[in-house]
Image (cartoon, grey):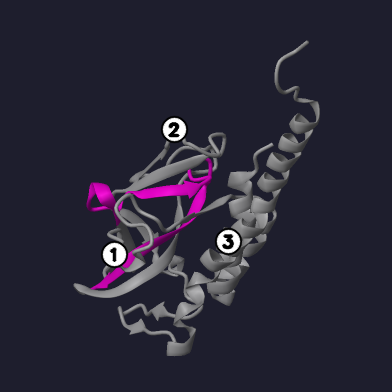
């Protein structure tokens, strides 16, 4: 039984909500996410950018007139790539370069709704399944492309940094800037812990086979 998509929602996504959402955002999203009224993906990695987080190309440009962010995938390499559960999720924490008046303020995360209550994709959102993988092949892993997707200003995760109505950027305290990566660090540690299950399965299979295997010529 493979729980990859659900495990990411209940681990990385919920952890990110708890550590990076403001109290107002947690009031709106956290309870619903904990009760599985929607499912979230962690959309950081891009087709052209893995560990180089600062090189991510997805943009979130602030529109003063409408008080919205416009999330966009400008290139093929900016497609969000490899998020577990992406194809089946309704929402996602999407990492993008924050642009205000042409100035880049670096990587920030935004709550993006992928699907409506009927499961239909939202305008400007393209989501797909990546297809066959080496391992684990039965885990739902997808990609996403955004074409001028508009979000309320409220949807930028704002526990440590904010953008005001007039477009002023309020930077996080320097010593708290790295808290946004708690989810990624926690899941990497968890993966090390989970590996014991595969090792235990492999060892059990090998030992059982060794007990019954007949070697050499039969009389």
Look at the image and tell me whether residue 32 can be seen: no
Q: Position of residue 69 (x, y in %)?
A: 33, 64
Q: Residues within 10 Å of mark 3 (few under 14, many from 20)?
A: some
Find the residue positioned furthest to the left. 102
188 and 199: which is toward the camera: 199
Residue 197's disc is: none
Q: Position of residue 38 (x, y in %)?
A: 59, 50
User: Height in image: 180 above or below 7?
Assistant: below
Mark earlier in primary sequence (1, 2): 1
Mark earlier in primary sequence (1, 3): 1
Find the residue positioned furthest to the top. 219
Verify whether residue 92 appears in magenta: yes
Look at the image and tell me whether residue 186 can be seen: yes
For label 3, the SS is helix
Q: Identify the magenta region.
A: 72-100
User: Is the Cβ of the residue at disc 1 closer than 8 Å to that at disc 2?
Assistant: no
Residue 131's disc is: 2
For label 2, the SS is loop
Label 1, on which residue? 55
Q: In which quadrant of the rendered view does residue 161 lie?
A: bottom left
Q: Residues within 10 Å of mark 2 (few under 14, many from 20)?
A: few
Number of marks: 3
| Residue in the image at 67% along x and 62% along y | 31
Q: Which quadrant of the figure contains the C terminus?
A: top right
3D distance between C-alphas at marks 2 and 3: 23 Å
| Residue in the image at 53% along x and 45% along y | 85
Q: Is residue 213 left or right of residue 157?
A: right
| Residue in the image at 73% along x and 35% along y | 205
Q: In which quadrant of the rendered view does residue 150 lie?
A: bottom left
Verify whether residue 47 appears in magenta: no
User: Height in image: 113 above or below 136?
Assistant: below
Label 3, on which residue? 187
């Amino acid at each position: 039984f493979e729980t990859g998509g659900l495990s990411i929602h209940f681990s990385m996504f919920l952890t990110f909500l708890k550590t990076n959402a403001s109290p107002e955002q947690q009031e709106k999203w956290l309870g619903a996410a904990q009760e599985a009224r929607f499912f979230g993906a962690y959309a950081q990695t891009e087709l052209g950018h893995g560990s180089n987080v600062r090189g991510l190309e997805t943009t979130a440009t602030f529109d003063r007139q409408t008080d919205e962010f416009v999330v966009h995938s400008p290139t093929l390499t900016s497609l969000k790539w490899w998020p577990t559960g992406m194809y089946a999720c309704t929402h996602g924490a999407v990492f993008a370069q924050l642009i205000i008046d042409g100035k880049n303020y670096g990587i920030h995360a935004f709550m993006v709704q992928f699907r409506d209550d009927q499961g239909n994709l939202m305008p400007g959102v393209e989501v797909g399944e990546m297809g066959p993988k080496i391992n684990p092949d039965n885990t739902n892993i997808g990609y996403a492309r955004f074409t001028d997707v508009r979000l309320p200003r409220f949807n930028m995760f704002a526990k440590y940094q904010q953008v005001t109505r007039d477009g002023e950027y309020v930077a996080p305290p320097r010593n708290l800037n790295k808290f946004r990566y708690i989810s990624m660090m926690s899941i990497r540690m968890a993966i090390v812990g989970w590996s014991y299950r595969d090792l235990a399965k492999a060892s059990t299979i090998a030992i059982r086979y060794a007990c019954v295997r007949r070697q050499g010529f039969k009389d």
